[in-house]
Amino acid sequence: MSRARPEPVQVVKQRRDAALTALVEGVPYARFLGIRFDRRGDELTAMLPFDEALIGNPMLPALHGGVTAAFLEFTAIIELSWSLIWEDMEAGRLDLDNLEAEPLPRLPKTIDFTVDYLRTGLPRDAYARARVNRSGRRYASVHVEGWQDNRSRLFAQATGHFLMPARDG
């Protein structure tokens, strides 16, 4: 008995990128802000490209605090959702060739989200990474860090708790 030949790595990468793009573009506010994600394996880095419309205080100038909070919260939600999709992709439960016919999972709902503004968000691109501290069937806890030029100099960090969507099966 012979094994099925594995798919080329580039085909698998394209399908995973398509799943991530579908997940991110399903949220209109994220499209409005221009948030993008860079994927390396199962690790995601969010990017908020600078735009003059994101400035809250033109005298400094500084990124609007609401934009910063939304960016961090969206990063946490996508990290949680991606971890669910990743499990399904690796177990073969998600048909990546037919994403339109098989909808992606519902997004987690925010229970609470606390942001620490550590320094002024400067008028430049911002990045964020989320770490899932705990994820169960009903509840998840996530920590997010945001930076601009230097990852060791955070401009904001946040902790959030989320209600996980019901899983089929």
Image (tube, rainbow, N blue to C red):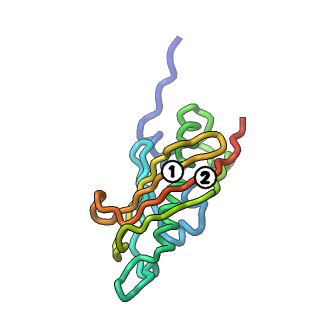
Instruction: Say which element carries label 2.
Output: strand
Return the residue at label 1: 142
Q: Is residue 45 left or right of residue 67?
A: left
Q: Amino acid at mark 2?
A: Phe
Above or below — where is 125 with respect to 3? below
Which sits in the foreground, 47 or 101?
47
Which sits in the foreground, 136 or 49?
136
Question: x, y percentage for residue 107?
Answer: 63, 53
Question: x, y percentage for residue 64?
Answer: 46, 77
Above or below — where is 58 with respect to 169? below
Asked if the residue under mark 2 is in contact with the one under mark 1, i.e. CB atoms within 8 Å, the reply is: yes
Above or below — where is 36 with respect to 93? below
Q: Amino acid at mark 1?
A: Val
Residue at 48%, 62% in the rendered image: 72
The residues bearing labels 1 and 2 have C-alpha atoms spaced at a distance of: 8 Å
Above or below — where is 12 with respect to 115? above
Q: Is residue 84 left or right of residue 120?
A: right
Instruction: Say which element carries label 1.
Output: strand
Which sits in the foreground, 107 or 32?
107
Q: Is residue 25 left or right of residue 60?
A: right
Question: x, y percentage for residue 91?
Answer: 57, 31
Residue at 45%, 48% in the rendered image: 131
The quadrant of the image that shows the C terminus is: top right
Residue at 72%, 39% in the rendered image: 168
Residue projecting furthest to the bottom: 59
Q: Which mark is residue 162?
A: 2
